[in-house]
Image (cartoon, rainbow, N blue to C red):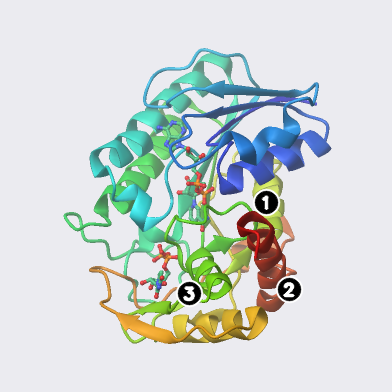
Amino acid sequence: MSRVLVTGGAGFLGSHLCDRLLRDGHDVLCVDNFFTGSKSNVAHLRSHPSFELLRHDVTFPLYVEVDRIYNLACPASPVHYQHDPVQTTKTSVHGAINMLGLAKRVQARILQASTSEVYGDPEIHPQTEDYWGKVNPIGIRSCYDEGKRCAETLFFDYHRQHGLDIKVVRIFNTYGPRMHPNDGRVVSNFIVQALRGEDITLYGDGSQTRSFCYVDDLIEAMVRMMDTAAGLTGPINIGNPREFTIRELAERVLALVGGTSQLVYRPLPSDDPRQRQPDITQARAVLGWEPRIGLDDGLRETIAYFRRLLGR
Ligand code: NAD
Ligand code: UDP
């Protein structure tokens, strides 16, 4: 069993990954600066003998001894990553440099949590890994998109130049318990609004599409990718290929929560991608993986979590 570093480990995905790695018998070092993550996401792990929590910002170097690194540190919701865009780029780029430097020093395998945002507002549909993307370099999403793209560049240059054992996964919209209730992402927004009986805010006309993956499916794919043979670098898409319009999502959430919320329309933020759906042919072939949890089942779990959190 190995010593595993999870950066961003107190966030939504990171905390589920820590759970899974501990279940698999690993020693887990969770590193987080608590910008969008919180101690409460990992509070249940604090007495676990194989779990350690360290407050640290990945834009500064880190000296630890580990065998594997999952690099997840980075705010993921548009509201949060646009709050301090310079820090967002630094987190992706300096964070990648620091974690790659650490991996090189201790000869660790390192996995990057990249994103479907590297495809920008895509011209091909569904998106395959060989598509280079259509990304605005100077827009309000660029700090995140270009930061993640540069991080991928760094990963592949460390691999070519220093022989580093890298893995890159491109994650498509993922949801589930422990999403931040105010992080502005669509699934948490709609559920919280429905539970509070507030209006459900559709940006634009709600005809843009996303493909939503439940967190447990996503973590399974990430762990499988980390365990693939050396040399299998990716990038590899992971996500649920079932595509929905945002209006369909709102209607499903409303049907499952019940209540009296109305659908209301708000301006579409700039550079908001029109459509997004992963082609997961590679993930199926290489990881023997595909998502198992459908939207309604995943939403029920997520709604139950927010009911407990909000006391509704
Ligand atoms: P999240 O915001 O819940 O988690 C990010 C974590 O990183 C938080 O705990 C935050 O405090 C921490 N963090 C931020 N900046 C940091 C820094 N400088 N140093 C140390 N820690 C820092 O978001 P998430 O959804 O769990 O996303 C995790 C990763 O997966 C991110 O890298 C994100 O880009 C990627 N991703 C997520 C999705 C998704 O739909 N959830 C999709 C694509 C990619
Ligand atoms: N969205 C929406 N209402 C909200 C929040 C988001 O209609 O209250 C839309 C948003 O404009 C986008 C989609 O939902 O088209 C997904 O947004 P999210 O921020 O979850 O993720 P991303 O745009 O990064 O895929």
Q: Which numbered disc, 2 or 3, marks the residue closer to the eye? A: 2
- How many neighbours does mark 1 have within 10 angstroms: few (below 14), some (14-19), or many (20 or more)? many
Name which residue type carries label 2. Asp
* Residue that label 3 marks: 210
Task: Measure the C-alpha gap from mark 3 to mark 1.
Answer: 19 Å
What residue is drawn where x is 27% and y is 75%? 268
- How many neighbours does mark 2 have within 10 angstroms: few (below 14), some (14-19), or many (20 or more)? few
Q: Nearer the viewer, residue 289 or 163?
A: 289
Decide if ligand 1 comes within 8 Å of the CB at mark 2. no
In this rendering, would 179 be left or right of 262? right
Decide if ligand 2 comes within 8 Å of the CB at mark 3. yes
Name which residue type carries label 3. Arg
Task: Measure the C-alpha gap from mark 2 to mark 3.
Answer: 17 Å
* Residue that label 2 marks: 297
Q: Position of residue 261 (x, y in %)?
A: 50, 83
As drawn, the label of residue 262 is none
As drawn, the label of residue 219 is 1
Q: Is residue 210 visible?
A: yes
Q: Position of residue 59 (x, y in %)?
A: 37, 26
Q: Position of residue 255 (x, y in %)?
A: 63, 86
| Quarter of the N terminus within the rendering | top right
In the rendered structure, which disc, 2 or 1, sits on the residue that comes first in sequence?
1
Q: Position of residue 211 (x, y in %)?
A: 53, 73
Q: Nearer the viewer, residue 58 or 225?
A: 58
The quadrant in which residue 116 appears is bottom left
**Count of picture labels:** 3
